[in-house]
Image: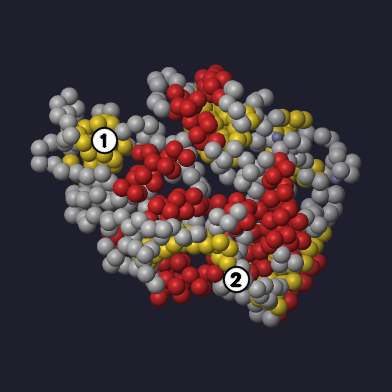
Amino acid sequence: MIADVVFDLPLAHPFSYALPAGLVVRPGQRVRAPLAGRLRVGMVVAVREGTGDALRPVERAVESAPILSAAALELCRWAAEESLSSWGATVLSLVPPPPKRADLVAPPPPAHPGAPGVPELWVDAGRDERLAKMLRDGGAALVITPDIEAAARWAAWVDAARLDSGATAGARRAAWFAAARGRVRTVVGTRSALLVPLPPPATVALVDEHDPGHKPPGAPRLHTREIVMRRASLESSRVLLLSATPSAETWWRCGAGLIRRRDAPAGPWPEIVTADTRGILRNHPLTLPLTRAIERSAREARRVALIVSRRASSLLCGECGHVLRCPECGVALAALRAGRALRCRLCVRTRPTPDRCPGCGGHRLAPFGWDAERVEASVRRRFPRVAVSRTDPRATVLIGPASLLTALRGEALGAVGIVALDAVLSAPDFRAGERAFALLWAAAEAVAPAGRVVVQTLLPGHYAVEAARAQARERFYDTELEFRSELGYPPFRRLCLVSAQGRSEAEARAGRGDCIVALAGVPGLKLYPPAAGPATPARGARWHFTIKGPPDVPRLVAGPLAPFLAKRRRGAPVVEVEVDPS
Ligand SMILES: [Zn+2]
Ligand SMILES: [Zn+2]
C-alpha cells in the first residue's frame, strides 16, 4: 500500500511513501516519515494500492487512528486553494500538538451531512450572555476567540475545555479527543481549534467577528470566518457570528441574504461627547470634557478607561485635521523614515511630503498620536490622589490600547476617554473607518448608561463618530460600503499581496518582476505596478506588489503564479501570496 502525505511546507503536492507490512493508516491520520534528510510529522491525505518498491517507507503512525475526518481534510484543501498556500501547511496548523509517544486515540465521529442552515449574526448588547447561556444548556459547541486572553475568559465563564496554546499540550490533546467523543460539550480555542471534530448537532460560534486577531499572518492564510462558514456548510452545523460592529463584508452579506442578522431594539446608550482638539492636543492629552469626565467618575467611585491607540505613521494637520491621502486609493499615506516622503501602501506610489497642509495652508503636519506613558504622567499630575495605572487592573483610571475594553467587558465604567481617535482614523489602511467605528461602539457598550464617552478628535464630523453617537449602525455601514464600492475595496473587490523574498535586492526585485509579467493580460485584474518599495526582512530582501480583482481572484492568479509557488527552486526567490491582507 502507498500513503500520500502532506507536510508543513510550502509545497503544493503530497509525497508518496510505502506502508510497511503491518502498518495500517487511514486518511486524516498523522505519521512520521523521512523528508529531506530528517523525520517529519505529516498528514496522510490518501491511501492507495501499489507496491511502492521504489518509495521510502513511513516510519510510524503518530496516533492510532485518524484525528481528522475526510470532510476536514477537504475543508483544508479548499482553504489552501482559496489562499494560494499549501494543503500541508494549512492542515498542520489546525491540529493539536503531537504526543511524545505513539498515542491511542478514538477516530472522529462519522460524517453527518444535512441541509446547511444560514449563518446568524448577533449584534445586540446581550449577544455574549445569550451565547453563554446557550452553551450551558445546549449540545456540542466550539467557541472561537480572536486571542488566547479571550479564550481564557470564555473558558472560565462557560466552564469549557481549552484548545488554544494558552493551555498545555497535554490539556489541548485531552480537550480535542474529549470533544470528538462527546465527553465535553463545549470547547474554546483560537483559530488553531477550527477543525476539532464535534458530534452533531454542533454549533460553531465566532466571538468578535470583526477582530483582526481572526486573520493574523501565517497559516491558515484565510480569515477564520470563511473557514467556519465553509465547515458549517460541509457538516451542517450551526454558525453564530458575534459582533456589535461586524466587518463591512459580513454586513454586506446580510444584505445579500447570505447571513441572517438578528436585530434587537436599541437599548440604553450613553452620551458620546466629542472634544475638538484642533490646535491644542499637541501639548496636553486631556481636554476639558475629558478632565471633567474623570473628575465626575472618581467622585462617583466609578472607573475610567483611557484608550491610547498606537501612533499612526501617517501625517495629519494639527490645525484643521486634514489627513494626507492617496488620491487614487483613498487610504492615508504612510510617512517614510525621515518624514521627507510619503508612500501609499496599496499602489506603492511615493511622493514628497508637502511643506504646508493642502487643506488650510498650516505648517503643523506631523504623525499623530500619544504614547500611553506620557498620557499616564499627565493624568497623574492632574489627579494626584487618584490611582492611575497602565498595568494594575484595580486602578481607578486605566490606560491602555483598545483591547482594554474587551478585558473590562461586563463592568459598567463611569467614562471611557479616547485620547486621539485620529490615530485610528488616519491609519494607512482601508479599514480605518471600520476600526474607528468598532472602537467607539465598544467604548459606548463599556460605560454605564449614565456614564459618558469622550472622543478627542480633529474630525468630530466623521461619519463613524456621528453614527456611533446616534447608535445608528445602518448609517455607518451605508456610508462605509459606498466608500468601499467607489474605490474598489472588499466586499466589492478582493486584494492580494504578492511578495518575492530573495537573498539580495536584485533577486527579490527580479522575482517580483517575473510574477508581474506572468499576470499581465489576465482579465479583471488590476496590478499596482510598484514604482519603488523594498521591505527588508531580517535576511535578504522582499519586494511586493498588490493585485485588486473580482471575488474569484485566487483562481485567476493561481495558474499564472503556480510555477513560482509550486516548488522551492534553489537560488530562486520565495514567492508568497497573502489573499485578503488585513
Ligand atoms: Zn495609492
Ligand atoms: Zn490643515
In the rendered image, residue 536, in percent from the top left (x then y), is placed at 55, 30
Residue closest to the eye, 143 or 428: 143
Q: Amino acid at mark 2?
A: Ala
Q: Earlier in the sequence, mark 1 or mark 2?
A: 1
Marks 1 and 2: CB-CB under 8 Å? no
Image: 270 above or below 229: below
**Residue drawn at x 59%, y 23% as measured from the top left:** 521
In the rendered image, residue 398, in percent from the top left (x then y), is placed at 62, 66
Name the element at disc 1: strand
Q: Amino acid at mark 1?
A: Asp
Q: Would residue 465 appear left or right of 503 to someone viewing this image?
A: right
Q: Is mark 2 within 8 Å of ligand 1?
A: no
| Pointer 1 residue | 4
Count how many numbered circles sit on residues in the image.
2
Q: Is mark 1 within 8 Å of ligand 1?
A: no
| Pointer 2 residue | 125
Q: Would residue 219 appear left or right of 340 to someone viewing this image?
A: left
Q: Quadrant of the N terminus?
A: top left
Task: Work out how far the residue at label 1 is from the one at label 2, CA to CA, in angstroms.
Answer: 49 Å
Image: 134 above or below 476: below
In the rendered image, residue 559, in percent from the top left (x then y), is placed at 48, 27
- Residue furthest to the bottom in view is 300
Residue closest to the eye, 344 or 1: 1
- Residue furthest to the front in view is 115
Q: Would residue 95 appear left or right of 375 to someone viewing this image?
A: left
